[in-house]
Amino acid sequence: MLAIRNLEVTFGGVRAIRGISLDVAKGQLVSIIGANGAGKSTLMNTVAGLVQPGGGDIMINQDPIGGLPARKVVKKGISLVPEGRRLFVNMSVADNLILGAYTRHGKQKTEAIAETLEMVYELFPRLSERAYQIAGTLSGGEQQMLSIGRALMAKPDLLMLDEPSMGLAPLVIKEIFKTIITLNRAGRTILLVEQNARAALAISDYAYVLETGRIVREGSGEKLLCDPGVVEDFLGGH
Amino acid sequence: MFDTILSGQIIQYLFTGLTIGAIYALTALGFNIIHNVTGIINFAQGDFVVWGGLLMVMFARFFGFPLPVAFFSVVGVMVFIGAFIYYFNIRPIKKPSILTMIMVTIAVSIILQGVAMFIWGKEPYALPSFIEGPPVYVYGAYIMRQSFWVLGISVAMVLFLTFFFNRTLIGKAMRACADDPGAAGLVGISTPLMICAAFMLGSALGAVGGAVITPITLMEYDRGAMIAIKGFGSAILGGLGSFSGAVIAGFMLGILESFATGFVSSAYKDAISLVLILGVLFTKPEGLFGSGANKKA
């Protein structure tokens, strides 16, 4: 579904991504792990169109999207849940979700959008209880749920999550990961970036390890969990 | 006897203040709409008011359009001019920064003023009231009929904007750009389109103010700067970005000016309101009603 070939990105004068190629097949949960500053977020932001690539190709369903602005990438079926959540903090939960479906308004029936909204509320009942609360006043976990919900409202083919566990309490992280598994089991293709490597690898079909802008290891989640190099670098074991 | 004269005077000044305050409020709303989406102060906002007034005179008096037709033509032309300003002045900026965009709006203001002088000349133009008739007598004061139009249309505009920004998709999308332009892009909102919409709405709003106030105050080409300063002052007093704050502050400033004119001297009215604006900027820069929640301000 998503194919990246020899991607190069220079960001802030630094070669943040140095020739990355990776694939995400339909229905898979693929994760990218790596230390701070390895280029994980830059990679996600480049696919989403927030950062312009310096070279290489990004394709979704054989359709090149490299260099398109974010608002056009969404229309191609990729939604990013950005690092730091980036909600519309002065607007209500419901308005955040409605804007998530912005690209579908006018093209699809309002019933179809209402159906997705119903699905998001079912997935996160807490959002439905707080539909008219201002997003900025939600707890960190609820804000993360809203950010995921907003991305789902676009009915994306590929859902990308950038550090969804960041700054959350362990119990909340567990809940977020459960949601990710639920979404994947329901057939959704997911690309996940995580610092919480153990949790990410445990639920992934396939994973890539990023180091200073390069992919240094790849394999199934299970295989990487047992890989001595990965264990030493990311899982804190010897 | 003295009491009734005084209370009549107070009502008179109050109505005069509300009328002029309504224009400040509309101008302040125009500032806020464009500021909220782009983060810039549009210095051409006062000139939109001038153009609204002068176009209204042209359509109603010289072309002889019926008033409602003239009014909506003015709004239509100004929506177009707003889009024109965006496409040919804001959009071509290679590296848009707040400062360069503000400089461009100053240039636009000078151009609008120049073109207005070229078309209409330097003399002030009068416009008959929307409905002719003698002033209405209210508790010892004579209120011009046009004042009711000004207040009514201003209230209608505030209601329309409240509806627009809270209930319509495009209004919500514009607010989303104000909150986080990057995230707005992620959900598919085109920030350039929303900035264009903000300019269209801002110029239409200014023009409505100009069209309704001209029968009372007359209008000439160079009135924009002072209107912009008062409108900007109202926007600041009300807390930049806050719609309700802008409306309340606009009315307050108008009433203050009117009382200053009546009880002190008309020579001091601008000075008094500007001193108030400076005072607020020094002591409470987030505005009288600003909560500090609007981080951009």
Image (tube, rainbow, N blue to C red):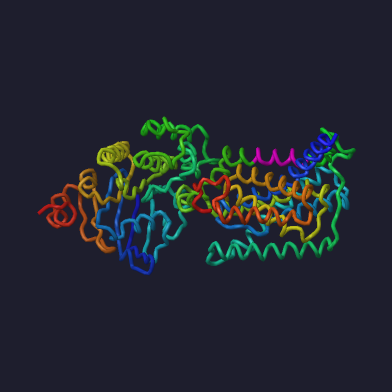
User: In the displayed image of the protein, which residue is found farthest to the bottom?
Assistant: A13
Magenta span: helix, strand or loop, mainly? helix
Q: Is B92 drawn above or below residue A34 in the view shown? A: below
Q: Is residue B33 visible?
A: no
Nearest the eye: B288 or B204: B288
Left or right for B223, reference A130:
right
- Give the residue drawn at x 57%, y 56%: B282
Residue A176 magenta-drawn? no
Q: Which residues are magenta?
A: B149-160
Q: Is residue A118 visible?
A: yes
Q: Is residue B293 left or right of residue B268?
A: left
Q: How many marks?
A: 0
Counting from the top left corner in percent of width and height, residue B242 is at 58, 46
Q: Is residue B81 left or right of residue A1?
A: right
Could you say which is closer to the camera, residue A147 or residue B158? B158
Which percent across, then down, holds residue A94?
Answer: 47, 36
Report the front residue among B95 and A159. Answer: B95
Q: Is residue A66 above or below residue A135?
A: below
- Tell me where residue B160 appears, x and y as whole percent: 65, 39
Q: Residue furthest left?
A: A238
Compared with A137, A230 (above or below) is: below
**How far across and down, in percent of the image, does residue A68 sit?**
46, 58
Quadrant holding the C terminus of chain A: bottom left
> Is B259 situated left or right of B290 in this image?
right
**Residue at horizontal 87%, vertical 38%?**
B135
> At 85% from the left edge and 55% from the top edge, which residue is drawn?
B125
Residue at x 34% of width, y 68% of height: A14
Observer-nearest residue: B170 or A129? A129
Q: Residue furthest front?
A: B2
